[in-house]
Image (spheres, rainbow, N blue to C red):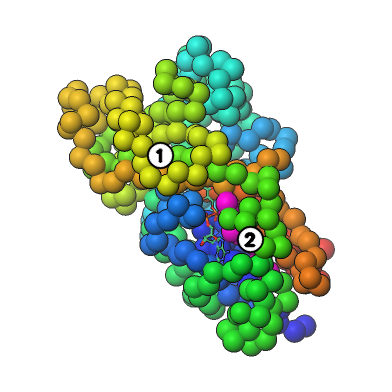
Amino acid sequence: MSTKKVVVIGAGVAGLTTALLLSKKPGYKIVVAAKHMPGDYDIEYASPWAGANYMPVSIGGTEAAKWDKDTWYPLADLAKNHPEAGVHFQECEIHSRAKDKGSATANWFAELLSPNPWFSKVVPNLLVKVQVAPKVVPAPRHGLGHGFHFISQCLGNGVIFKRAVYNHILDAAADCSVQLGGKADLIVNCTGLMASKLGGVEDKSVYPARGQIVIVRNDAGGKMLDVSGTDDGDDEACYVMTRAAGGGTILGGSYQVNNWESQPDPNLAIRIMKRAVRMCPQLTNGKGIGSLDIIRHAVGLRPVRQGGTRIEKERIGGLWVVHNYGAGGAGYQSSYGCAQAAVDLVEEACGTRSML
Ligand code: FAD
């Protein structure tokens, strides 16, 4: 069987995980081509901004829940057995306030706040309490470190990385022919929010949900804290989480639908810090926000897609394209499940899938 030449467009968590899983299969030559790579910070690049925790919001019985479930086991393995991956376990307390019932955040968190979420059978040490709703042990990641870990693993498996910006998805096929030794047989589309603008795709059901955060050096005491809503509006959120490997503590946040603003809003930043310090006084030993030691203010855009992540194969201009984009606020916690589903489609399209 001849080697199949594949271009993965995108080096966010979706592109890197898909390239990594595909590179473990024999018979593929792979190039990851992207405008942004780990180490870059840009409003078109969601992955560096995520707290990157595992806190499923998918509804039991759906495809999304399966992708989340299939992601738990590899993440737990990384946390337990591969410290170099920068993935760690962290206790998480989620507070459910009765007054948030029916709000956008509470609806988004519905499964998470339910007394018997589907993942109670997957995630160990899940305690469901009345009022102080699920207490879980998630696996947050340090996004940046994890990106580099993925690149190293991909490089070890022979994947080639290159910078490129495409106006049309099919431009990638010829553009990578030098690295692939000929025109690509298949393109994997992991362009996140930019799938809404990429020629040949232009998916208008993809839109941003803006997340503003403050990253500080202060310590939250090792726990992640989250609450079902705030008193400052439906599109604001309150969470505190510590990143692995000295990545700082993230104070969040917001979920502002269809808002493309790349610059931090200073008033929102003050509200985020005030809420975080109120919820987690140990951040500043009971002192106010003046005692927060700020690393940076930041904004990321979650690539949300109406109807959920798109994992499909499609013929475009006579070439197979496999899509894996639109994970919204769940790109890390669904990463392995989505990537595996995309790899299955690549194998189907290339006729390399074993039915055993
Ligand atoms: P991206 O990371 O945006 O990557 C897209 C890639 O495609 C980039 O490399 C880009 O350069 C490339 N690209 C796009 N267009 C082109 C083009 N035309 N030509 C060449 N290259 C192109 N998720 C969780 O699971 N847990 C969390 O706790 C969590 N917290 C979050 C908090 C915040 C504040 C934010 C903003 C997001 C959070 N998320 C979380 C969501 C998560 O960050 C995203 O779902 C995920 O990063 C999306 O990854 P992606 O690879 O699809 O897209």
Rounded to the nearest angstrom, the CA distance separating label 1 from label 2 is 25 Å
Residue 207's x, y, as percent?
Answer: 60, 44
Which tag is nearer the camera, tag 1 or tag 2? 2
Cβ of disc 1 within 8 Å of ligand 1? yes
Relative to 133, is 317 on the left or the right? right
* Res. 111 image quadrant: top right
Q: Which residue position is annotated with label 1?
A: 212
SS category of the residue bearing label 1: strand
Q: Which residue position is annotated with label 2?
A: 198
Residue drawn at x 56%, y 28% is: 109
SS category of the residue bearing label 2: loop
Extreme residue toward the top, this view: 99
Tell whether position 346 is magenta.
no
- The vertical placement of 262 against 231, above or below, is below
Q: Crowding at label 2, few (<14), some or many (≥20) Cα neighbours within 10 Å?
A: some
First in sequence, mark 1 or 2: give its number. Answer: 2
Q: Does residue 134 appear in the picture of this structure?
A: no
Residue 32's x, y, as percent?
Answer: 56, 71
